[in-house]
Image: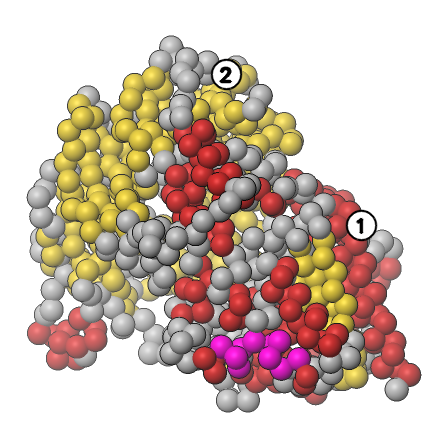
Amino acid sequence: MRYLALYFFSFFFIAANAQKTPFTSEDALNVKSFDYSSMTDDGLWVAGTIRSGMDRKDVDHFRFADPSYVAPYTSELVIINSETGEIRTISPAKSIINAFEFSPDGKKLAYVKYEDDRYRLFLYDLSTDKSKLMDIKDERSISPSNEIYWTKDNTAVIIALRADDWLTIGDSLYREATVGPITVYDGNEPLLKWEKIRYHSSLNEVVKVDIRSAMITDILPESRYDDVNLTENGDTITFIEYNPKKTAYQRKGGTDYGLYAIALDNPSERDTLIAPSEKRINISWDESKTHFAYTDSSHIYVQSIGQSKPTKVSFDTTEISKKDTMDAKFSFMRWRHDGKAVLASSKTGYWLIDIDQNTMNKVYDLPEDPDEAPSRSIIHWSKDGNSWFMAYSARDKWERGMVKYDIDSRTFTDLMLDSNLYSRWRVSKEGNQFFYNFSDGNLPNDLYVSDPGFEGTKQLTDLNPWISTRKITRTELVKYRDVDGNELNGVLYYPVDYEEGKKYPLVCELYETFFNNGYRPSMNMVANAGYFGFRPSVSLEEGYPGEAWIKGVTSGINKLIDMGLVDEKKLGVHGVSYGGYATSLLISQTDRFAAAINISGKTNIISFLGDSPKIGTRNYAAAEVGQDRIGVSLWEAPLKYINTSAVMFADRIKTPHLLLTGEGDWNVTALNTRELYYAMRRLGKDVVWVNYQKAGHGAGYNGSATDYHDQWKRMLEWYKKYFDKADEE
């Protein structure tokens, strides 16, 4: 039955594609997306930016971390009416927009835009459909990493500025590190040189700007601030202040963090809510921004502004401890809208903690096997406190959407469940509008809105109407087991002119784990070249990450061969960054692939530790406690570092290898990938290294438009060359 259904689906798929034109790299750069981050309280208007791949081109990657450089990441700022679908352009395409926020009454939109060589504050009036520049009379400049906060009375905004000597000092630090003529790196200094530059860049002063007079009132002096909030009544600001003291290599320590509150009418006096320490502050504020909650030592604490000590609100009941002591360990989840209760999670379920009543009850049971049960995450807690709206995703198939959970009856109601892809859920403050990105799983996202019952769903954007005239791949979820018996998922992308019963070349795109489908330009390029695309998952184990791809990727390929879809002589593989690293490591362990491409991936994890000075200790942390999953330092287990460095096994590589890098890559330097080129060349292997002189991380993907097109041309030619060669053998 499956094959009969697949036959008819394939027939209609081919017929539909017959009248369409191929999807090209030019198309890939022209696909638009919408990023929204502000809406009016009633959900009538939503603000966001529209951009395409062309809006991230021509960046000078060599000037990363230069305090005087503004990267040309451009977009069009728009607002959309959720009732009528009206779209208003607030700032045209090719604008550099850094922040935007609606006023509490929903009548104005404040936004920060780079214009005439500096960031400027603008005010858009919805009633007149006009913007005006706030002519701030001050020598200080607006911070590019700015957030905007409105006062409750709609008369002022709170923003961050930079001191008048900030740029002079920052430029001096940057030039010392890049121009010299002599640059000294002293290990006795508490901070690395590039950390000093980064921490200087994070310095801000917080001010209030009157929107009628553009007059400034100073609130906070120059320092480093995070999680700035204005209380709902508008009289108090809370903030985290952090002070770096020394370089830390494992993502903790070296910096003091403190939580404070000040009254707007008396900003010189601080109320210390959490005293400074090296422990990172991870708190959640209630809607009034006057109470916060956090997890400490597996318990939940709440505290109010003006309260000197926190209150522990979770507790170990006899019933809990008898069943399982692990179930008495809690993590904070979220506040109820009225601020009188919080939700906490344990190993077995969710607990409702009523702060006033001093009660704690389990209201939701988690499944015994979380890997088998559907994923449900709370998006919204109803205003009446009686129900949760939960994003839903099945684990064994593409069934996704929204369900409603009644807390008292502990029952679910399906609001919207199907095979489509839903993401970026946002709910208006009044709870009457649900915004989300929608895709059928193959096409790019558009913005939709719905009422709480999901009976009046409405499409708000149609960003890429032209894409209906292009040949677009279709997707299928594939399940398989790796060598260790772990069940894994892979996403299969069909050739655009697929014919049932014919075997096709296969190109794998590597990273870590995959489940959801969705529009991907890379897989559409592969599918339009006449190949299957496949994004296989792997099961990564700390200490032995290099084994995952040979165990998982090859098993996924075997499944596709068993399904009769793939020509086993024509296998290709590539990946970007961590996926590029995986690609080179994989082909040092197997000769099954006809061609392989590493895009901005490291090949020597030992030299990688010190390869990226502009990002400080990130590479050490990645290896010891992060993504690279080695779990220990180089000096504790040198063999583990050798075993996860492809260059050490270059003599075993038999697969023709294309290496693509960007000379301006400050993340994974071209020098690191280059090591494998010289090793393979020395060994007489088939290898080509292409270095895009003005590109960054991702090589041609993150260079000019010319670089982007060139990279795709080279990649597809590389695969074709060696797939054709397989026919001759």
Q: Which amino acid does label 2 sit on?
A: Leu
Vertical placement of residue 307 versus 675, above or below: above
Q: Residue at x 64, y 56 (%)?
A: 698
In the rendered image, which residue does mark 1 sit on?
Answer: 469
Q: Is mark 1 on a helix, strand or loop?
A: helix
Outermost residue toward the top?
213
Q: Do the residues labelled 1 and 2 touch (CB within 8 Å)?
A: no
Vertical placement of residue 516 versus 700, above or below: below
Principal SS element in the magenta part?
helix
In the image shown, does 122 or 271 lie closer to the viewer?
A: 271
Residue 323 in picture, x, y percent from top left: 17, 80
The part of the image, by quadrant, that contains residue 301 is bottom left
Q: Does residue 196 belong to the magenta stretch?
A: no
Q: Which mark is residue 133?
A: 2
Residue 315 in picture, x, y percent from top left: 11, 64
Q: Is mark 2 on a helix, strand or loop?
A: strand
Tell me if I can see residue 231 in this picture: yes
Looking at the rendering, the stretch of residues picked out in magenta corresponds to 641-650
Give the left or right position of residue 166, taking residue 57 as reference: left
Vertical placement of residue 547 versus 468, above or below: below
Q: What residue type is labelled 1?
A: Thr
Q: Which residue is drawn at 13% across and 57% down?
A: 313
